[in-house]
Amino acid sequence: MSLAPSAYMADDSDIVARVLDGEHGAIARMLTQVERRTPAVNDLLAALHHATGRAHVVGVTGPAGSGKSTLVAGLAAAYRRTGRSLGILAVDPSSVITGGAILGDRIRMSDLGSDPDVFIRSMATRGALGGLSRAVLDGVSVLDAAGMDVVILETVGVGQAEVDVISVAQTIAVVSVPGLGDEVQAIKAGLLEIADIHVVNKSDRPGADRTVAEIRDVVRHSPHREGQWKVPIQQTVASSHEGIDDLMRIFDDHAAWLAGNGARTDSHRRNAATRIRWAAEELVLGRFRTGDTAFDAAVETVVSRQSDPVSAARKLIAGPIANC
Ligand SMILES: Nc1nc2c(ncn2[C@@H]2O[C@H](COP(=O)(O)OP(=O)(O)O)[C@@H](O)[C@H]2O)c(=O)[nH]1
Ligand SMILES: [Mg+2]
């Protein structure tokens, strides 16, 4: 049976209430709106905002094939054993298939596949990576508003844009594996400052001790101030669930540390600042489009030399912002 378009619209009229109730269908539709940045999305997100700020947002990043999806699936099971609900966003800009799809399959095949307290979604990545950061930040807010105790983000750590995406998380785990050689060193260089926890996965492989020693060396030489979080190194064998419960406990310790140090509020403050900036950009750019009456008039004043570009832009920005 196919639904008439009106049925879809009727369905979405109470989407905010349903997301707040944690209904998976509504969360999925809301995330689609977030990815597509539909005209309704700003108002919907505004209506959810009051219910956000509660989830512990954990980021898991590292090279492709390091076992992130396996780890996240294991962590999901560990969190469920403690009774917590969780939302998982898998983001892989290089290939949606290698990241999210595999994680989705893994979870669907496990007991968690039918668990109403686990929601999983891989985020498609269209267009600019800046847009991706925004979609991820908004996506985290949706899962947070839906009452998820924990939100896990899986991303491939390859460059600055991905570092920006993972920075949405309050607790960041950087995954390394033995035997990747120089390549992994390079990746670590970009991710080192943002790691709250180092994970050496595939610790069943030869060379794990060396990888741990190398990371320990780097951590030891990075500046450490009194009272700061001490970055731990946790070894795991995700494929046989070893070290996963310990890793979850470290995440919990970090959450407690953040809360005790006001760092959790700092992270909320950073996210708020970023989101206000994005919203402002959108509002301002919206008025600088050909076809907008005031903008077209300003273009004419510059062409006719009655005004200059900077004065015209200043005048437009100072004017009232309507319909945004
Ligand atoms: N030997 C070993 N293999 C693992 C371990 N964790 C994951 N794998 C395997 O590594 C491959 C890549 O894992 P995946 O979770 O998809 O990596 P991702 O690309 O980082 O998400 C899969 O074949 C996993 O079964 C581990 O601890 N030890
Ligand atoms: Mg993956």
Image: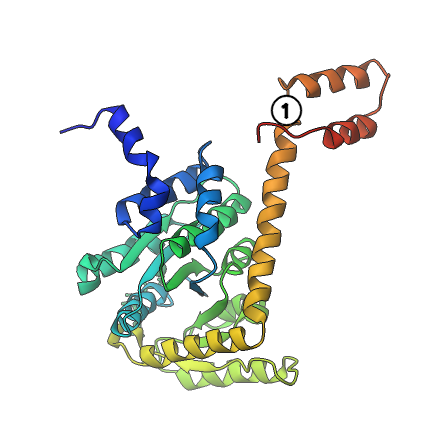
Q: Is residue 134 above or below residue 113?
A: above
Q: How many marks?
A: 1
Q: Residues within 10 Å of mark 1 (few under 14, many from 20)?
A: few
Foreground residue, 191 or 58? 58
Return the x and y of residue 298 as percentages of the image width and height: 75, 19
Return the x and y of residue 200 as percentages of the image width and height: 41, 77
Q: Is mark 1 within 8 Å of ligand 2?
A: no
Foreground residue, 121 or 54? 54
Q: Which residue is mark 1?
A: 289
Q: Quadrant of residue 219?
A: bottom right
Return the x and y of residue 161 as percentages of the image width and height: 55, 53
**Residue at disc 1, secondary structure:** loop
Return the x and y of residue 18 as percentages of the image width and height: 31, 45
Residue depicted at 29% across the width and 55% down the height: 119
Foreground residue, 156 or 40? 40
Q: Is residue 125 left or right of residue 185?
A: left
Amino acid identity at mark 1: Arg
Q: Residue furthest left?
A: 1
Tell me if residue 251 can be seen.
yes
Q: Quadrant of residue 98?
A: bottom left
- For the C terminus, the quadrant is top right
Foreground residue, 270 or 305? 270
Displayed-image quarter of ligand 2: bottom left
Residue depicted at 35% across the width and 60% down the height: 148
Residue depicted at 40% across the width and 82% down the height: 208
Residue depicted at 46% across the width and 81% down the height: 233
Tell me if residue 205 can be seen.
no
- For the N terminus, the quadrant is top left
Q: Is residue 163 left or right of residue 312?
A: left
Q: Is residue 194 left or right of residue 318?
A: left
